[in-house]
Image (spheres, grey):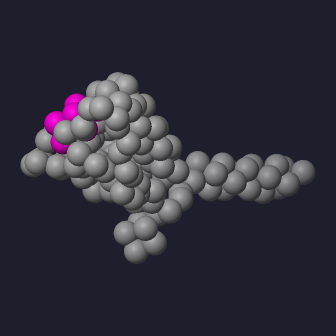
Amino acid sequence: MKRIFKIGFMFLILVLGFTGCRTSNILNVPQQTIVAPDTKKEMTQDDVFKAIARAAGGLGWIVQKQSDGVVQATLNIRDHQAVALINYSATDYSIQYKSSVNLNYDASEQTIHSNYNGWIQNLDNAIKLQISLL
């Protein structure tokens, strides 16, 4: 009877270990066309930068402008870190994975912890919202 409990306990630990390490293919947001909310006003690259900065900052991302049209966004949660590059212009933007810490990134498989994809989806939705408010 003791042996059955040991085997059952070991199996439970194994199952919990595997479910705690959910990975998915990395989500990159390809070129998203920006539609100006007010057709009378033309969007500028600076408008888009401000929308990205507000969106990312509101979600806890740290935004650093790398150059004209390129922003690095870093999210630190507990002992995890996600870094994404956001390329933008007055007419479009895209979000690309740059690096991570403690998110089970596998370069050969292009997989990462599934929480990363949720954070990127939230960031993308927040950017779209901020652009719509311009």
Q: As displayed, is residue 34 above or below residue 126?
A: below
Splitting the image into 4 quarters, where does residue 38 fall?
A: top left
The magenta stretch spans residue 48: yes
Please state which of residues 112 and 44 is positioned toward the viewer in this rendering: 44
Splitting the image into 4 quarters, where does residue 76 fall?
A: top left
x and y percent of residue 92 in the render? 31, 50
The magenta stretch spans residue 77: no
x and y percent of residue 34 in the render? 35, 45
Please give the name of the residue rendered at 57% of the width and 54% of the height, measured from the top-left corner. 22
Number of disc labels: 0
* Residue 86 in view: no
Q: Is residue 95 left or right of residue 42?
A: right
Q: As displayed, is residue 41 above or below residue 84?
A: above
Please give the name of the residue rendered at 42% of the width and 42% of the height, measured from the top-left corner. 124
Please give the name of the residue rendered at 30% of the width and 32% of the height, measured from the top-left corner. 40
Please state which of residues 17 and 112 is positioned toward the viewer in this rendering: 112
- State the residue lying farthest toward the left: 67
x and y percent of residue 109 in the render? 45, 72
Please state which of residues 9 and 26 is positioned toward the viewer in this rendering: 26
x and y percent of residue 68 in the render? 11, 48
Q: Is residue 73 left or right of residue 29?
A: left
Q: Is residue 115 left or right of residue 51?
A: right
* Residue 81 in view: yes
Image quarter (top left, top right, bottom left or bottom right) of the C terminus: top left
- Identify the magenta region: 45-51
- State the residue lying farthest toward the right: 1
Please state which of residues 34 and 76 is positioned toward the viewer in this rendering: 34
| Prevailing SS of the magenta stretch | helix
Q: Is residue 95 left or right of residue 48?
A: right
- State the residue lying farthest toward the front: 40
